[in-house]
Image: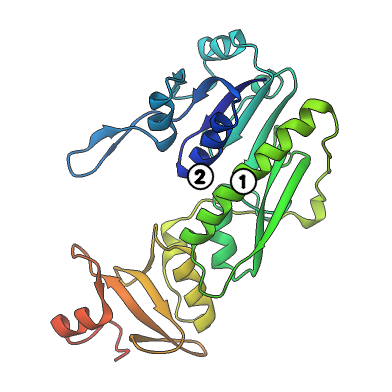
């Protein structure tokens, strides 16, 4: 079973590792180009590329998949499957039709809910108590293809984007390994998405990150945990890393009560606890103390 794998971040790495450990033939790995990182802005490999290089897998890093030469290189591999997991580049229609069996995606939500780039963050930001992961046939419209398999898990009241992400990447790899044999032997379910139930999860913007104290304390709390550990909620230039609803931190008034900030970061400063911040500064902007 020849597979072209397309993915970039840590979420995708879990699936690629599962495929190689299971003995699948990875004909090539497509991942986004290296990006400058850190103070020195040195080019850094994506998590997927770093692993692929160690495994001596063939790696492609095109800026776009619209290039004919890139497509011809992929076509020459004659893949049975293309598996896409958090790749980050749009797949033109000819890639969807390239594999002899299927072009499939591992998506971090229970489709048709939360189509888009930030489903894990937004499901926590919105205070959902349940989410999941699914495999689907890729279609021209983003995340609109027929669902193959899905698995569900609960979101706890204190869960953050970070730990929901970590649960989901493992579950996504498990669902992928269950999906491929079903597709191979022709017994895979194919569930058409109900368009009346579609919701979207667009990328997180700067405006999305700002805490609106005109909303409820619960909404502010969900925003903070939905953006932890990154890109972090913000308030008046501060990064707000953690908070709770019970006390023991810096109180921030909201529409129906208060949240209590327990970890924060002033502009240009290091991350500190609320106690450390108050010891060095005395108060917090906004007149909430």
Image-based side of 7 in relation to 283, left or right: right
Identify the secondary structure beneath mark 2.
Answer: helix
Q: Quadrant of residue 283?
A: bottom left
Q: What residue would you read off at disc 1?
A: 172
Image-based side of 83 in relation to 187, left or right: left
Give the color scheme: rainbow, by chain, secondary structure or one colour: rainbow
Q: Who's the residue at 65% across and 16% down the image?
A: 79
Q: Quadrant of residue 184?
A: top right
Looking at the image, do the residues carrying marks 2 and 1 touch, with CB atoms under 8 Å apart?
yes
Q: Who's the residue at 69% across and 19% down the image?
A: 80
Determine crowd level at label 2: few under 14, some 14-19, many 20+ residues with C-alpha closer than 10 A. Answer: many
User: In this view of the protein, which residue sits in the foreground, 218 or 136?
Assistant: 136
Q: Disc number at residue 11?
A: 2
Hey, which residue is sitting farthest front in the picture? 22
* Quadrant, the C terminus: bottom left
Q: Who's the residue at 56% across and 36% down the image?
A: 18
Counting from the top left corner in percent of width and height, residue 259 is at 43, 84
Image-based side of 65 in relation to 141, left or right: left
Residue 87 visible in this rendered orientation of the protein: no
Mark 2 and mark 1 lie on one chain; the one further toward the N terminus is 2
Q: CA distance from mark 2 to mark 1?
A: 9 Å
Q: Disc number at residue 14?
A: none
Residue 240 lies, with reference to residue 30, above or below; the image says below
Hey, which residue is sitting farthest left in the picture? 280
Q: Who's the residue at 48% across and 55% down the image?
A: 204
Q: Quadrant of residue 22?
A: top right
Counting from the top left corner in percent of width and height, residue 116 is at 60, 47
Residue 108 lies, with reference to residue 236, above or below; the image says above
Residue 75 visible in this rendered orientation of the protein: yes
User: In this view of the protein, which residue sits in the foreground, 199 or 190?
Assistant: 190
Residue 189 lies, with reference to residue 33, above or below; the image says below
């Amino acid at each position: 079973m020849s597979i072209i794998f397309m993915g970039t971040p840590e979420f995708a790495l879990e699936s690629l590792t599962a495929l190689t450990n299971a003995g699948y033939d990875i004909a090539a790995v497509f991942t986004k180009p290296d990006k400058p990182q850190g103070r020195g802005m040195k080019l850094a490999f994506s998590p997927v590329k770093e692993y692929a290089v160690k495994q001596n897998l063939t790696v492609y890093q095109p800026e776009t998949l619209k290039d004919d030469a890139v497509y011809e290189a992929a076509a020459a591999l004659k893949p049975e499957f293309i598996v896409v997991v958090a790749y980050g580049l749009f797949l033109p229609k000819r890639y969807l039709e390239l594999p002899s069996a299927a072009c499939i995606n591992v998506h971090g939500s229970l489709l048709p809910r939360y189509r888009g780039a930030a489903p894990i963050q937004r499901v926590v930001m919105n205070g959902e108590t349940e989410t999941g992961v699914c495999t689907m046939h890729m279609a021209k419209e983003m995340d609109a293809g027929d669902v193959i398999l899905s698995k569900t898990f609960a979101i706890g009241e204190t869960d953050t984007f970070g730990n929901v992400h970590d649960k989901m990447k493992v579950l996504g790899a498990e669902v992928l390994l269950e999906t491929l044999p079903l597709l191979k032997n022709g017994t895979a379910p194919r569930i058409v998405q109900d368009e009346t139930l579609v919701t979207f999860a667009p990328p997180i913007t700067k405006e999305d990150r700002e805490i609106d104290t005109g909303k409820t304390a619960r909404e502010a709390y969900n925003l903070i945990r939905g953006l932890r550990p990154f890109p972090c909620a913000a308030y008046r230039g501060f990064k707000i890393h953690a908070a709770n609803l019970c006390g023991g931190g810096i109180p921030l008034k909201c529409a129906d009560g208060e949240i209590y900030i327990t970890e924060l970061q002033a502009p240009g400063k290091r991350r500190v606890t609320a106690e450390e911040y108050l010891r060095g500064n005395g108060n917090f902007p906004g007149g909430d103390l």
